[in-house]
Amino acid sequence: MPTGIPVPSFQPKGFGGFKDVSIQRSHSGRVGLITWNPPKRLNPLTVALTDELVAAVEEVKGDEKLHIVVFRGAGGFFCCGDDLIEMHEGSWGNPNQVMRRIRYYQQFAQQIEELDKTTIALIEGFALGGGLETAMACDFVLAAESAQWGMPEVDNAMTPGWGGTTRMIRYIGRRRTKEVNMIGALRSAKTAVEWGLFNRAVPDGQLEQELQKLIEVLLSKNQQTLRQLKFVINKNADADMTTALAFEAMNEVITSAVNWDPLTPRIPDAEPGKGLEAFAKKNELWNRRRELARKFWAD
């Protein structure tokens, strides 16, 4: 768990309150931990739980003090996917209502992907179906070595609806996405790292420590720079090369206006002027950032 004194769960406006989801802050309010703990084993995404997660993401979206959001399932499991028993009992309704719910889930994943904060999925146990789709929407995926992942929908005569094919193919390519979805096997965290789906898999007992190290590195950065990097990388992934290069160039112009000039301190955590000054003087700020980052995950 993030270190520091947690702040109790808070409720989004217009929402009746969380039952199976909690939000805690740490690191002076800069890190938020969204945890889900439904009564069913393996943390399936019931309709009610998903509604709470959507509300939780909407709440952290509006908090400008938060720089990092961690997503985690309770009880040693991330999420086994949609609650198929609930679905079998008719909770999703008729085909038109299924379409509406799928689009609602797609918007949920898009909200995570487009948060102006760095997001981390912490994977333990299983990340299957909708659970894996949630993780893929995050910026970083850190997993315990014992964790398993996959898209087993095919064996339930189902197809993924909110990223299991579309977002996955952008990470691991067409052939592996077909293999994952058309066979439905469960794979190791190590394979996810080798294929580029997860960032790191660490021994189970080191997961918390590795999370804290990643948080420390990320919090040391200029947060406005991280926001701009996330935005341009996400958008350029789906653009043609000419458009992407133009967008990248414009992003650097914005960076110079926001971060380089000490006379334009319009964004509190943009640290205008400090980044280049730190490099030029090799001061404490630069030394700390480089010491934290130089060999982090560089093996």
Image (cartoon, rainbow, N blue to C red):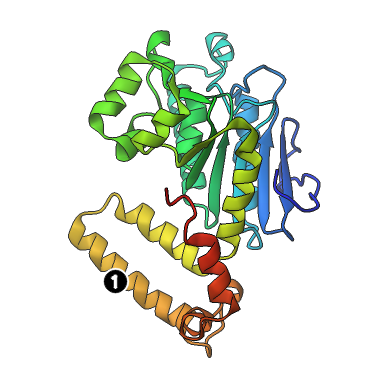
Query: Looking at this rendering, what residue extends furthest in the bottom direction?
Result: 263
State the image coordinates of residue 236 (x, y, percent, origin top left). Answer: 30, 55
Question: Quadrant of the rendered structure where residue 247 is?
Answer: bottom left
Mark 1: secondary structure: helix
Q: Is residue 229 above or below residue 56?
A: below
Can the viewer see residue 57 in this picture? no
Q: Residue at x 57, y 17 (%)?
A: 83
At horizontal 52% and vertical 53% (from top left) the residue drawn is 115
Find disc 1 in the rendering and name its residue: 249
Residue 85 percent coordinates (x, y): 57, 10
- Seen at 61% across and 49% down, the residue is 69
Query: The disc labelled 1 sits on which kind of residue?
Result: Ala
- Badge 1 density bin: few <14, some 14–19, many ≥20, Cα 10 Å: few
Name the one closer to the observer, 103 or 50.
50
Does any portion of residue 54 appear in the rendered image?
yes
Q: Name the side, left or right, on which 263 lies relative to 30.
A: left
Question: In the image shown, does 175 or 18 lie closer to the viewer?
Answer: 175
- The residue nearer to you, when weighing 83 against 98, is 83
Q: Which residue is painted at 70% across and 43% down in the image?
A: 1
Depicted 142 relative to depicted 292: above or below:
above
